[in-house]
Amino acid sequence: MEEIFVDIHCHSTMRAVHTNPNGQHKNIWDCTNNDIVDSYLGKWAAIKSKAISKKSQSNFYNCIQGQTRVIFDSLYPLERGFINLKKIPSLLIGKKAIETLTVISSGVSIEQFRDYKATNDYFHELNEQYKFLERNQGPSPCGKYNYKIVANYSELEASLEKHSNTINVIVTIEGAHAFGCGTNDSEKMPIEELKKLLKNNIDEIKRWEHPPFFITFAHHFWNQLCGHATTLSPPTNLICNQKKGLNQSFTELGKFVLKELLSTKNGKRILIDTRHMSVASRKYYIAFIADHNKMQPNDKIPLISSHSAVNGFKKMDHSTKTEDTNSKKKSTKFCSWSLNISEEEAISIHASGGIIGVILDKGRHSGIDNLKSIELLPNSENKKNLFLKLLCDNIFFIISAINEQSAWDTLTLGTDFDGVITHFDDYENMSKLPALKKDLVHFLTINNYHTNLWFGYTPEKLMNKLFTDNAMAFLRRNFI
């Protein structure tokens, strides 16, 4: 069997559903481009979002070219916090400018933006994305390839052995708002009525033919379930309001939803991804899982952080002592926001038998000044090598924290392609994963980079684990 890669977090379906340029049929295979707004506002919006790709990164032809045969496709109903903005900035900038900026930077079509502005039925949108992914299974437009959703590891293994031209899709969700909470309407509902609604919706997705393997519980905005971490920088944070629920812990409603998802009495367990949770929420959940795993050693639940980088702190609490602003990460080596992983959290994830997906968003890996110094380099080869070093610095921070050979079992890829990220310059989409792997092996070899932390592995073996083996082993243990 040819070499294959695994990506545990990308947004192929979301991108296809949100982007409908010029009324064309939505297609998960072909490259889609963001709508172009040919005006002064359009040019302004393009400049403001120049670091973000304006074309699809994880479309399935890119996956084929990049040998990515297993993807975790994260369904995501667009949070209305990106559309219903702060009042004063909205008045100053104007509705047209906000629409233009959202359309050009995110890939949401103009028609889709206006539909989202008028409604907030997250659960309906979740179901529509799932139905789109499910009904379009089968041959590619050229007829040479296929994709199928797989239900468990045995089905995945059989498909990989028999069908070398097939992309195997594992369903995930980003944001528990998808169940119908975190809206103005749900905020007004009596708590018992809301509990009933969320329970019914969770029961419904557990009845899907292919229920989600895991859910990223929090995302960018308040979902009434748990606090989220700061994610938005200027100019986005000037017009989008993340303050509500920021840095809070789990609510009683959130604890109820958590138990419904993890339960095996109402269907297949849906695992929890801690990425985007506040530190307070992550600490609660890590303790919850530690207690569960101690009391039920034959039913262990792994911790997951599906698309992450590190913040450079030893303890989780250390990352919250200063507010997450641009000044906090201005002169730091790593992106020092509390969103990212500390040594303490890496150790907890490893201890649970969990997994960390390394995100391919350069802005999440680095402090501002450090990133600017790399981007200003005139020599493209020097720039590429420093980006590779930045990735390796983040990876080896986790290995050093755990400080044993099995640390290398904890890491995999969670690219976040099509998640509106600032991609690394030479690795802008899924087709570039083979080049990234080759370049990382070369970088480790010629620089003898932290050989004391290789724990006897070769660079080739380390990258095999990162790009493929660890994710497959994690699925073998948990995707049942």
Image (cartoon, helix red, strand yellow):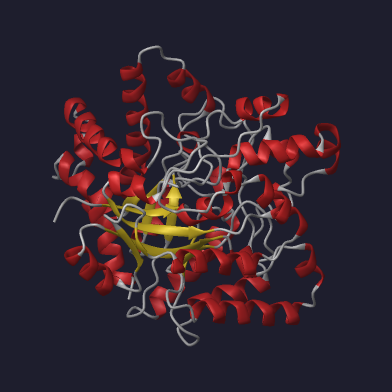
Q: Residue at x 52, y 22 (%)?
A: 369
Quarter where residue 439 is shown: top left
Quarter where residue 72 is shown: bottom left
In the rendered view, tell whether residue 470 sits above or below residue 443. Answer: below
Q: Position of residue 40 (x, y in %)?
A: 72, 24
Classify residue 356 as left or right of residue 471: right
In the rendered view, tell whether residue 99 sits above or below residue 354. Answer: above
Q: How many numbered tags mark residues here?
A: 0
Q: Quadrant of the C terminus?
A: bottom left
In the rendered view, tell whether residue 390 sits above or below residue 106. Answer: above
Q: Position of residue 63 (x, y in %)?
A: 33, 48
Quarter where residue 255 is shown: bottom right
Q: Position of residue 333 (x, y in %)?
A: 45, 29
Q: Position of residue 240 (x, y in %)?
A: 72, 43
Question: Which residue is outermost to the top?
Answer: 378
**Front-lying residue, 262 or 62:** 62
In the rendered view, tell whether residue 306 sits above or below residue 98. Answer: below
